[in-house]
Amino acid sequence: MTAVDPTQDDKPKEYRCQYGDRAFRYHLCYLSGHKRASIKAHVHPNGQVQVDAPEGAGLSAIKAAVQRRARWILKHLDDIEERTRYVQPRQWVSGESQLYLGRRYVLKVIDDPDQRRVTCKLIGGQLRVQGKDLSPKRTQKAVSQWYRDKARDVFERRLKLMVDALPWAQAVPPWRIMEMQTQWGSCSPEGAVLLNPHLVKAPTRAIDYVLLHELCHLQEHNHSPRFYGLLDRFMPEWRSIKEQLDGQAEELLGSSENNPALRPTQKS
């Protein structure tokens, strides 16, 4: 959920790290304006390894830091391979489950020859998709749009509540939803917030954690001790919430159109 940091040349360079009889490649990104930052490694859910280094850091020092973290990186790569092995693609048929605000609902596909416009509604314990000639693709499109609409409503309400509780936040920052392959959310240097619509499937407390994380970046646009101090102050239990959210990532994000088995960035 880190904000996207610019690189020195806006194009990450790829390097290779050998660790025993195993090897992996990683993308190196230089963080402009972060001369005192430490070198950090991130393992993205698609198996991409990213290394962030402060501006001006020497390549030999960066490679040595990656070598020290190689065992950790390989462990997370192994974990990703193990998790994605059991992620089953959705068929978009009746009986499959869908999550919304942490609760599970049964997908009900109703083929109605008299209804040309496809609708998607939450009724009781079912998420009902109804319309004429409902193919799996049309069903998926309807459900995805329903999630996006719900995400806008839920995020708007929770953002307003969160902003009221934070002394540095004068108003809800500009924000929008966007499916992201490696993040639940991000905050640009200009203070614009992006939120992953799949987050609306998680419990409200998990949504609040992600919103707080991004709003804290309005005050501390980094991951310094001061940043984590803000998280601790306004949500002391954020670590356990994050752990639970990360543990559900494959299921929460498994219904995305490309089903990449997304997961928030892991950081060393």
Image (cartoon, rainbow, N blue to C red):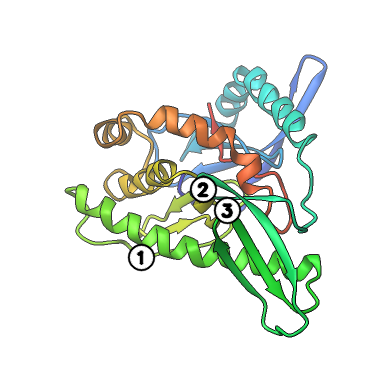
Is the residue under label 3 in contact with that under label 1 (CB below 8 Å)? no
Q: Can you give x and y, in whole percent of width and height, for residue 178 in the image?
A: 54, 61
Task: Tell me: residue 227, above or below residue 178.
Answer: above
Locate residue 227 relative to residue 119 in the image: left or right: left
Q: Earlier in the sequence, mark 1 or mark 2?
A: 1
Q: Mark 2 — residue? A: 184
Q: Residue at x 61, y 60 (%)?
A: 127
Q: Residue at x 64, y 64 (%)?
A: 128
Q: Mark 3 — residue? A: 125
Q: Foreground residue, 133 or 84?
A: 133
User: What is the three-letter code of the residue carrying label 2?
Assistant: Trp
Question: Around disc 2, counting alpha carbons within 10 Å, would you say few (fewer than 14), some (14 to 19), or many (20 or more)?
Answer: many
Outermost residue on the top side: it is 20
User: What is the three-letter code of the residue carrying label 1?
Assistant: Pro
Locate residue 84 relative to residue 101 in the image: left or right: right
Q: Residue at x 55, y 35 (%)?
A: 246
Q: Distance of mark 1 from mark 3, alpha carbons?
A: 34 Å
Q: Mark 1 — residue? A: 174
Q: Earlier in the sequence, mark 1 or mark 3?
A: 3
Question: Around disc 1, counting alpha carbons within 10 Å, would you say few (fewer than 14), some (14 to 19), or many (20 or more)?
Answer: few
